[in-house]
Image: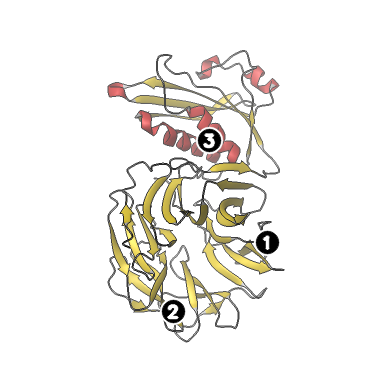
Amino acid sequence: MIRCLLLLPLLLPAISRAALDIEIVGGAAQQIPIAIVPFAQPQTATLPESVPTVIGADLRRSGMFRLLETRGVVSQPHDPVDVKYPEWAALQAQALVIGKVEPSAAGRLKVSFRLLDVLKQNQLTGLEFDVTPSQLRQTAHKIADIIYEKLTGEPGVFATRITYVNKTGKRFTLVVADADGNNPQTVLSSAEPIISPAWSPDGTRLAYVSFEKKKPVVYVQSLTSGQRYVLANFKGNNSAPAWSPDGKRLAIVLTHGANSRLSLINADGTGMQPLSQGSAIDTEPYWSPDGKWIYFTSDRGGSPQIYRISPLGGEAQRVTFDGSYNVSPHLSPDGKLLAYIRRENGKFQVAVRELASGQVQILSDSSQDESPSFAPNGRLIIYATSVNNRGILSVVSADGRVKQRLSEAGDVREPSWGPAAN
């Protein structure tokens, strides 16, 4: 029987796909109380998204904010001059968000917002966006990012994207979605397994492994045109693609017989060269943000541990020593933290290691975790876990305080967080 492979450009909406459901199961110790007033908008217009609703959901999901109910407040201002600060101070709000959605030229919309400091009674920031109705949700994510950064001092990640693999029945789909799980788009649908999706540094391409040729082959696919090409189809198995920080090369794993070694290859599929040597199983490469090291998993010491090697070659250096099983390395964007999966008392859990001090913290409380991936601000880590024998995605902050669960129909695995939004 011939099995068909379906390729869909990311520009097209996915069919019969539901957004990820999000359950917040933890929060930061200190949450900022914030009030978001419903935006003014044309009474005759039916908008596809409520901008303040999306902003509020983003901020609440971060675990850093406590949203205050605004319907009981007498005034519902849309301009700074109309704000009665004592009302919002009485509500114990520290920050206030107001705004408008107004018609613009040629069916477009002008979205404006203001972030106000209730205690100091002044404006912290404010911007206007000229967008199409279909861009309202992404605009709301951008506004939430601005608010988050202004009030916490850290970049937001609400306007970023994630990718993951979902198995429903006997079919596998590679999906790209907004960071909140909405707007899911099918990149690839196949009757054969798909694994190891990896974002290019500019966020325009995905490298992944597909078994459609009855063996693991590495592909690179454009997220705008849907076009793809074979990156690596050498003798044996080709797997675990990892982009270099400049996007010009990838580290891959080539397995032939009992040998599993790291290799480097140009992003156009040329110039393949071996990197690691020996008879050990070397796999799961991940580049350091400065491009000076490639971290990877190896059993060369007798048990799976994390090592690093220069892309120029040379001897590999062992990184993890505590515990008998440490795999799946992923570095924070600043290169200071190493997230990985550690087996402890029979549980496979997300751990974070501070590379400078060697201090390790277990972040998850589940037992079957895999594939940790940092958000571009280094604040959050997305990973896959299993609940009732079904794969779901979870998000935990790098300090372990903020936790979320994201689930949809099917068995969801192999998450990867995309780069910062442009």
Q: Are marks 3 and 2 in contact (CB under 8 Å)?
A: no
The local crowd at label 2, few if under 14, some if 14 to 19, many if 20 or more residues have their Cα within 10 Å, is many
Q: Is residue 249 above or below residue 110?
A: below
Residue 255 lies, in percent from the top left, at 42, 78
Cα distance in 3D space between marks 2 and 1: 30 Å
Amino acid at circle 3: Ile
Residue under circle 2?
261
Residue under circle 1?
361
Quarter placement of the N terminus:
bottom left
Amino acid at circle 1: Gln
Quarter placement of the C terminus:
top left
Amino acid at circle 2: Arg
In the image, 239: left or right of 78?
Answer: left
Cα distance in 3D space between marks 1 and 3: 29 Å
**Mark toward the start of the polypeptide (1 vs 3):** 3
Residue 350 lies, in percent from the top left, at 62, 61
Residue 147, labelled with which disc?
Answer: 3
In the image, 130: left or right of 53?
Answer: left
Q: Is residue 32 above or below residue 206?
A: above
Viewer-nearest of discs 3 and 2: 2
Give the residue at x 42% y 80%.
313
Residue 68 lies, in percent from the top left, at 64, 27
Q: Secondary structure at mark 1?
A: strand
The local crowd at label 1, few if under 14, some if 14 to 19, many if 20 or more residues have their Cα within 10 Å, is some
Residue 204 lies, in percent from the top left, at 34, 52
